[in-house]
Image (tube, rainbow, N blue to C red):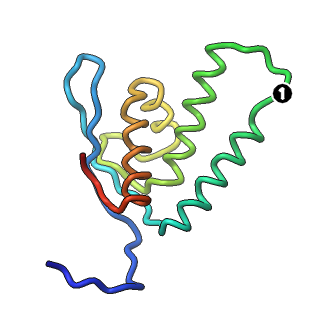
Amino acid sequence: MSKIKLGQRPQNFKHTVKFPMLDGSEGSIEISYIYRTRSEFGKFIDEVFAESKEERPEDDDFSWTKLMEKTGTANAGYVMRAVDGWNLDVPFAIEHVQQLADELPAAVTAIMDTYRNAITQGRLGN
């Protein structure tokens, strides 16, 4: 067992995130997450929700296209603030995270859920 030393926090931590592909197979991406304490994660989530409220126009006509674009953009923004790298064959950049959110939304959801579970519950895995 590892000896616990409080106050020696990591800058990041890696995890292989698994998610269902459209054909029913399982995909995976190794993600390097930015470490946050639980209280820092709470502040992070408050900031994410505050930004999403600011982006919602009150008198906007409903459109599924606009909803999907906004959701993908918001999720990509979350990932950009929670992750500092991945093992895909494209650079970790906003345009590629948005492409991932558009093409494989389950991957982005899994990346976000894994981060939340790791920070709030202190564990990774099933």
Q: Kindly identify the residue that appears in the image at 83 percent across and 27 percent down.
A: 58
- The residue at the far front in this view is 121
On the image, the x and y values in percent for residue 124 come to 28, 54
Q: Kindly identify the residue that appears in the image at 35 percent across and 56 percent down.
A: 32
- The residue at the far right in this view is 59
* 110 left or right, relative to 40: left
- The residue at the far left in this view is 1
Front in this rendered view, residue 105 or 120: 120
Q: Kindly identify the residue that appears in the image at 33 percent across and 63 percent down.
A: 13
* 102 left or right, relative to 106: right
On the image, the x and y values in percent for residue 11 come to 41, 71
Give the residue pinned by disc 1: 58
On the image, the x and y values in percent for residue 57 come to 81, 29
Label 1's element?
loop
* 93 left or right, relative to 20: right
**What amino acid is at disc 1?**
Glu
Q: Quadrant of residue 106?
A: top left
